[in-house]
């Protein structure tokens, strides 16, 4: 490789320079760790997949079922390790939200702003109606941190 090729690849960011090599190595290791975590989600784990069609594009809300015909269902009954929530536009999946089921259970019932609505067959299911903006707000992230560290006053995080 001649010096011109080396300079071009360093300028394009395709090859780390000596100056930024340490940061590149740390970023690479961090990226590989999280790639491994994603692979683990799909190997020998149970997943629950739900798909929102249509309404979420108008309301910005997703529905997370927790009871049906008076019995635990959905988030309260699943044995899944991970909850995959597809957001579809027409017949195409726009994106997929992925949560540890345990984390989603902790968060959704503790949100200060969610509604409980009835839906499904014969309107026999109860669902949390959760606003996507609220789900990813800084208040909810604070709540998540507090719940994850065993904080005792989680409601303070959402006020």
Image: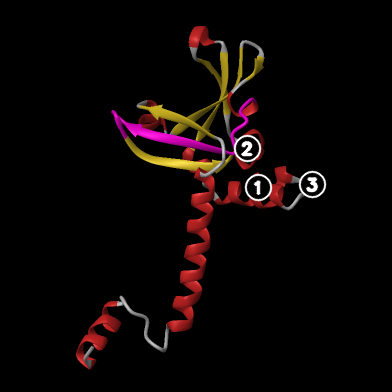
Q: CA distance from mark 2 to mark 3?
A: 15 Å
Determine the secondary structure under disc 1: helix
- Give the quadrant of the N terminus: bottom left
Q: Of marks 2 and 3, which one's residue comes earlier in the chain?
A: 2
Q: Residue furthest right?
A: 152
Q: Is residue 39 above or below residue 68?
A: below
Give the residue at mark 3.
152
Tell me the number on the disc at residue 111: 2
| Left-right relation of 105 to 6 | right
Q: Nearer the viewer, residue 64 or 113?
A: 64
Would residue 82 be counted in the magenta stretch?
A: yes
Q: Nearer the viewer, residue 139 or 84?
A: 84
Residue at (47% x, 39% y) in the render: 132
Please state the extent of the stretch shown in magenta in the rendering. Answer: 77-92
Give the residue at mark 1.
143
Where residue 60 sits: x, y (%)? 42, 34
> What is the quadrant of residue 112 in the picture?
top right
Determine the secondary structure under disc 3: loop
């Amino acid at each position: 490789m001649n010096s011109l090729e080396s300079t071009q690849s360093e300028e394009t960011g395709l090859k780390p320079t000596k100056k930024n090599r340490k940061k590149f190595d740390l970023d690479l290791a961090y990226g590989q760790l999280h790639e491994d975590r994603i692979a683990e989600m799909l190997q020998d784990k149970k997943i629950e997949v739900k798909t929102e069609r249509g309404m979420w594009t108008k309301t910005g809300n997703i529905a997370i079922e927790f009871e049906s015909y008076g019995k635990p269902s959905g988030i309260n009954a699943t044995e899944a390790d991970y909850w995959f929530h597809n957001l579809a536009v027409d017949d195409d999946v726009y994106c997929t939200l992925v949560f540890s089921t345990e984390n989603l259970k902790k968060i959704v019932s503790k949100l200060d702003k969610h509604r409980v609505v009835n839906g499904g067959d014969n309107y026999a299911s109860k669902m949390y109606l959760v606003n996507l903006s609220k789900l990813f707000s800084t208040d909810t992230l604070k709540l998540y941190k507090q719940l994850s560290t065993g904080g005792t006053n989680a409601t303070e995080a959402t006020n």
